[in-house]
Image (tube, rainbow, N blue to C red):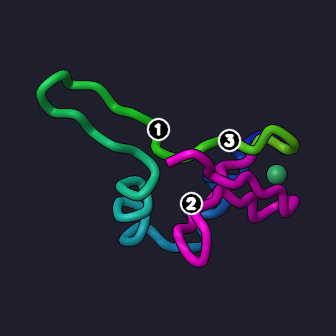
Amino acid sequence: MSWRVSITRRWYAMGKSKVKAYIHTLYEVDWSNKTVKLKTKKCPRCGSIMAHHKKPVERYQCGYCGYTEFVVGK
Ligand SMILES: [Zn+2]
């Protein structure tokens, strides 16, 4: 399953009203440069978008396959 397909399925599950809020959690818009940065990472194992958690330790976690990447040296 590609990450595009999986994210679309997630949007349908959440309903249209929540999609915008969800996009804001994924992307960071820099209005001065007019660029859009993807805030989250993609899972190296299955290609899904990974969730960013700050507690108890900062990490990125894939909700599909469970892959976790810890943020170190910050
Ligand atoms: Zn994964």
Looking at the rendered image, the disc whose residue lies closer to the viewer, 2 or 1, is 2
Identify residue type, mark 3.
Lys
In the picture, the quarter occupied by the N terminus is top right
Determine whether the beta carbon of the residue marked 1 sits less than 8 angstroms from the nearest atom of ligand 1.
no
Residue found 18% across the figure and 22% down from its top = 33
Residue 71 among those drawn in magenta: yes
The image shows residue 51 at horizontal and vertical percentages of 61, 60
Residue found 87% across the figure and 59% down from its top = 65
Span colored in magenta: 48-74
User: 15 or 26: nearer the eye?
Assistant: 26
The image shows residue 44 at horizontal and vertical percentages of 80, 38
Circle 1 packing at 10 Å, graded few (<14), some (14-19), many (20+), is some
Q: Which of marks 3 and 2 is nearer the N terminus?
A: 3
Identify residue type, mark 1.
Leu
- How far is the residue under mark 3 from the one under mark 2? 11 Å
Q: Which of marks 2 and 1 is nearer the N terminus?
A: 1
- How far is the residue under mark 1 from the one under mark 3? 10 Å
Identify residue type, mark 2.
His
Query: Is residue 29 depicted above or below 54 in this figure?
Result: above
Circle 3 packing at 10 Å, graded few (<14), some (14-19), many (20+), is some
Query: Is residue 37 depicted above or below 43 in this figure?
Result: above
Residue of label 3: 42
Residue found 57% across the figure and 45% down from its top = 73
Residue of label 1: 38
Residue of label 2: 52
